[in-house]
Amino acid sequence: MKKKLILPTVLAVILMSSCVSREKIVYYQDIDRQEFSDIKFETTIKPDDLLMIIVSAHDPRAAAPYNLMTDLTVNPTNQSSGGQRQQQLYLVDQKGIIDFPVLGKVNVGGKTKDEIVDYLKAQISIDVKNPIINLRIMNFKVTVNGEVNRPGVHTIASERITLLEALTLSGDLTSYGNRNNILITREEEGTLKTYRVDLTKSDFMNSDFYYLKQNDIVYVEPNKTRINSSAVGPNVSIYMTAISLLLTTTALILTNTRK
């Protein structure tokens, strides 16, 4: 009688150890009980940002001095093709300064795109009638690593991305990702700030870390299952399955032998 109880007991232990509760897997479980304010997000310029700033106007010749252009090398085998010009990028230095044509040193660090555009428009309007200023951050990127399916650095063309969108770009969390303790690292004014996000709760959607900023780093730490399996080897589930099959086969053999 005791031998007959061995197999069911072992199988029960295996099944219980492989089960994961809903609370550890499902995202924002309390979202039906939450109210979300109108979340506003504006990108601010930081050191090492690469900016493309294009000034245009009804009179292109009047706007030309305010554009940072460079002549491309002319192909010596085709001198008749003429020189071409390419828009250059502005690198924001560690003090938040760029060197702008005609205007000279312009402090853009910590300012929003709208603030910079308004300032440039006011200065350029002295010489150019109704100038149009287009500004883009060309190296807006976020990094996602840890327990995700596709870790890596993601360049964002829209300059606006949420934490959930960044995780989706990385193929979402693996089954071993800890959903209630995601780490976000952000540099602000030379200081690194960290924030912990619990994806099983929805309150983070009202926080400053719902939208990511350029150069943010998202780290998904492993859950206890991954940590424990690393101590005995990554193939522990395979071993457990093999053992259960062996026990099942042995039980069947013993049963048939008695018959």
Image (cartoon, rainbow, N blue to C red):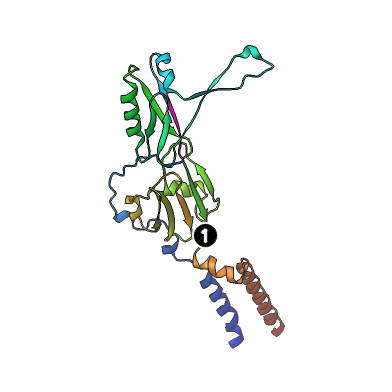
Q: Is residue 161 magenta?
A: no
User: Residue at 44% of width from left, 48% of height from top?
Assistant: 216
Q: Is residue 52 magenta?
A: yes
Q: Can you name the residue that lies furthest to the top here?
A: 80
In-image side of 232 versus 45 (left or right): right
**Residue named by callout 1:** 175
- Indicate the quadrant containing the C terminus: top left, top right, bottom left or bottom right: bottom right
User: Residue at 42% of width from left, 15% of height from top?
Assistant: 60
Q: Can you name the residue that lies furthest to the front here?
A: 104
Total number of numbered labels?
1
- Residue 217: horizontal and vertical position, in percent? 47, 51
In-image side of 199 versus 255 (left or right): left
The main secondary structure of the magenta stretch is strand
SS class of the residue under badge 1? loop
Whether residue 120 is visible, yes or no, is yes
Q: Quadrant of residue 226?
A: bottom right
Magenta stretch?
Answer: 48-54
